[in-house]
Structure formats: structure tokens, C-alpha cells
Image (spheres, coloured by chain):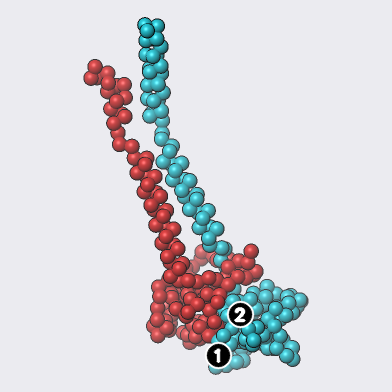
Chain colours: A cyan, B red
Amino acid sequence: MNDHAPNRTRALTRRNVLNRSSRFGPNMTPMVDVTLVILIFFMASASIAGHEWFLRAHLPDAQNPDLANSGYTLPTPMLSAELFVRDDAILVRGFGADPRPIETVIEQIQRMDSKLASGLILGILAGDEVPYAAVVLLHDAAASRGMTVAIR
Amino acid sequence: MRSRSIISGEGVGARINVTPMIDVVMVLIVFYLLVGQLAVDRKASIELPASAFGIDHTQEEDPIVVGVSADGMISINGQTIGSQRFAGEIEGMHTRSPNTPIRIRAHRDAPFGVVRPVMAQLRDAGVMRVELVTEQKR
């Protein structure tokens, strides 16, 4: 029994020394916690919200269909796209003799020579029932070829 | 004995441990930030259309953000506004700072019949150019 007593005393003493020394240094736990929580928050918010950007559109005077004389100067010549819905399909009038599906018109625009297209204005006129996303889709294709887009 | 116990660290051990409190407070803050953000998004209910081309936002000037939800609810800088008040409000803002860009955040499924009146009112207020906010196509 007596042999064990000094060992126990020594062990306790070492533990005390360790405890005491750990209290004197800066406590990193809250900082690590906060950093991790902030990191997770930003990771989550970044994955929820996609990257946003924008497309520029002109708003010519609706009363005056002639864009060149609509109160401010726009380059000419002009293309006109009229979007409407028929049998649940979005069609575009103005790119050929007959109305064409929007996908065909987008392909047509994407095939255009960007040098030629960059000097053009695309005037978009859409029916009430046309989804806004379809207007943006056409606008996107035109803007990618350097066209100026005017929404009427 | 008394002085020895103070020196040996018993007094230091009696301090209040604020670590759990900081943890809990931070978790609560993050929770309310997330919930608040989700609530705002749900309130606005605006899912943006995607585009492969776009111009990145610049921090030069704070734009006027016009929101249009799928059911035609209009907002200016996050504040819902009636369509009657919208024209006057936007005209005032545009007159005060004509160079401030105007961004339209419209729901992708909104029929154009809902977006067109907003654009018409902007045009009537003297706005010649707008920026249509989209989400980058992945």
C-alpha cells in the first residue's frame, strides 16, 4: 500500500500541471467553432444561390415602332422577332416566311456571323402568354452574337 | 493553505466558461440568417431565367431593383409595391438619379403580359435601358 502512495501523488501532480498549462494559452475552441459555422454558412448560401448577371435591354417608345426615331439613337438596321404561343409551342415570326419554333430561331441567330450580327438590333415583341424565360432565351442568343436588343 | 489553493489554480477554474454560450449564440445567428434569407426568397418567389451570356455586376453604383413575381407582384428594392404606386415611385427615383441602373428581376415563368406593363411604366418614366437579371447557365 505504501509503495503505491507516492506514484498516485506524482500522477495527480502531473495532471495538475497539464491542466494549469492548458488554461494559460489562448482558447482556440470558440474561434474554430465560429470559423466552421461561417464556412458552412457561406458554402450553403453559395450552393443555394447561383451566380447572377444581367442582359442589357433597350426600351424603345411603344408608340413609335421605328426604333431609330424613338427618342434616342440606336444603330440600324433592325431585325424583328414576334413571339407567340400556339399549341403549347413558342413560335417566332420574323425569321423567314412562316413562324418558326424558338429553338430554330436561336440556332439561326447562333449561326450568324458575329461581325455582321454586332451591328444589328433585335426588336422583341412578345405576346401576353409567352413566358418571360423565352424572351430572355432569345435575348441571350442575340446578345451572345453582339446584337443590341430592344424589347417593345 | 488558503494562499496555496489560489496559486494552484482553483480561482482560475471558477471563471465562467463562455465557450458554449458563444457556440449557441453563433448557431442561433446563423439559423436566423438562413431562415430570414429563405423567407425573403419565398416571399419574393422569384426564380430567375438562365442565360449563357451576361454582364457581371459591378459595385460602382447601387442599382434600383425591380422585382416581378410569377403572379405579377411588383417590388422595388425588395419592398412590395402596388402597380398604381409603382409608376410614380419609379419616376421619382429615376428623376432623382437618372444614371442609376435599373435591374429587372422577373420570375422565369411569369407570362410576358405581367412583365410588359412594368417595362411600359419604366419607359413612361423615361427609362431607356434596363438590365434583365438572369442566372448563369451551368
Q: Could you classify mark 1 by the number of other residues whose Cα lies within 10 Å: few (under 14), some (14-19), or many (20 or more)?
A: some
The residue at 41%/35% (across/down) is A27
For residue B58, above or below residue A18: below
Q: Given the image, what chain letter belongs to the residue carrying mark 1? A: A
Question: Is residue A20 in view?
Answer: yes
Q: Is residue A50 left or right of residue B80?
A: right
Identify the residue shown where x is 51% and y is 64%: B59
| Among the two numbered marks 2 and 1 on one chain, the one whose residue lies closer to the N terminus | 1
In the image, residue B137 above or below residue A30? below
Identity of the residue furthest to the front in this view: A1
Instruction: Label 1, secondary structure: give it.
Output: loop
Q: CA distance from mark 2 to mark 1?
A: 17 Å
Return the residue nearer the eye: A31 or B101.
Answer: A31
A145 lies above or below B59: below
- Residue in view at x 44 percent, y 45 percent: A34
Which chain does the residue under circle 2 lie in?
A
Circle 1 sits on which residue?
Answer: A62
Residue B48 percent across, percent down from the top left: 55, 71
Residue A8 location in percent, x, y? 39, 14
Q: Is residue A118 visible?
A: no
Looking at the rendered structure, the kind of residue marked 2 is Val
Q: Quadrant of the C terminus of chain B?
A: bottom right
Amino acid type shown at disc 1 = Ala
On the image, the x and y values in percent for residue B93 come to 42, 77
Circle 2 crowding by C-alpha within 10 Å: few under 14, some 14–19, many from 20: many
According to the picture, the residue beneath numbered tag 2 turns out to be A135
**Quadrant of the snapshot with the N terminus of chain B:** top left
Q: Nearer the viewer, residue A15 or B2?
A: A15
**Seen in the image, is A51 located left or right of residue A78?**
left
